[in-house]
Amino acid sequence: MAKSKISKLTILTEFEVYQSAKDLSKKDAELLLEAQKMVKSAYAPYSNFQVGAAILMENGKIIGGNNQENAAYPSGLCAERVAIYYAGAQYPNVGIKTIAVAVKSKNVIVNEPLSPCGACRQAIAEYENKSGKPIRIIMSGEKGQIYIAKSIESLLPLMFSKKYL
Ligand code: THU
């Protein structure tokens, strides 16, 4: 039988798993609390799925964001990108250390960590590449476990980046 020319590339990805916010470090718990606060002012009348994000910058500043929906659906934006683009606009030369994400749905109970959508992963990747330092991502649901990724690479392996351009 002819030897197969196909080999496999296996990519391992890893997250820290916390049983509750009580197990987080003080700094991470504080950032998650900020994200939970931002959930309350999300503008999500169409999906009823409110998301909050809080970003810890390297200069210690905390930037909040939440999803902003629109009657023309694709014109809306996720919480993570609202926060990260604001951070990029306000502090163009400051790196991002951590982003925390929280959620509250009026339709279901989100009992697992909310994982950023593909477009938000790409946006987070951009700022990680911009500063050259990893961005930690704290993902939480309304209840249940909390996941922490050490870098966007855990969520977006084989990412497209400036290295191709
Ligand atoms: N959404 C976020 O803000 N972040 C996510 O990580 C996932 C989805 C928003 C987009 C939209 O306003 C609503 O949640 C439902 O998709």
Image (cartoon, rainbow, N blue to C red):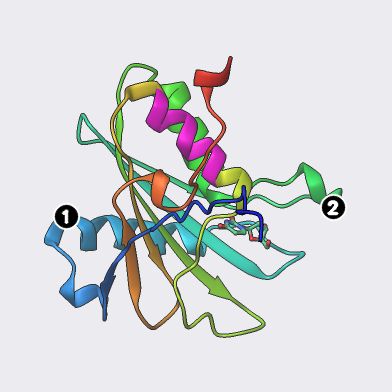
Residue drawn at point x = 73 percent, y = 67 percent: 47
Describe residue 150's horizontal placement relative to residue 128 as left or right: left
Relative to 7, residue 140 above or below: below
**Which of these two is toward me, 138 or 39?**
138
Which region of the structure is painted magenta? 121-129
User: What amino acid does circle 2 point to?
Assistant: Ala
Provide the residue designation for mark 1: 27
Q: Secondary structure at mark 2?
A: loop
Confirm or deny contact between disc 2 and disc 1 (CB under 8 A): no
Pointer 2 or 1: first along the chain? 1
Depth check, front residue: 17 or 20? 17
Ligand 1 found in image quarter: bottom right
Classify residue 1 by image quadrant.
bottom right
Residue 85 at x, y percent in the picture: 51, 32
Q: Name the residue that disc number 2 marks.
A: 71
Q: Residue at x 58, y 65 (%)?
A: 50
Bin the neighbour count of mark 2 within 10 Å (Cα to Cα): few under 14, some 14-19, many 20 and up: few
Which amino acid lies under the numbered mark 1 shown in the image of this protein?
Lys
Q: Quadrant of residue 141?
A: bottom left
Indicate left or right for 23 with 89 as reference.
Answer: left
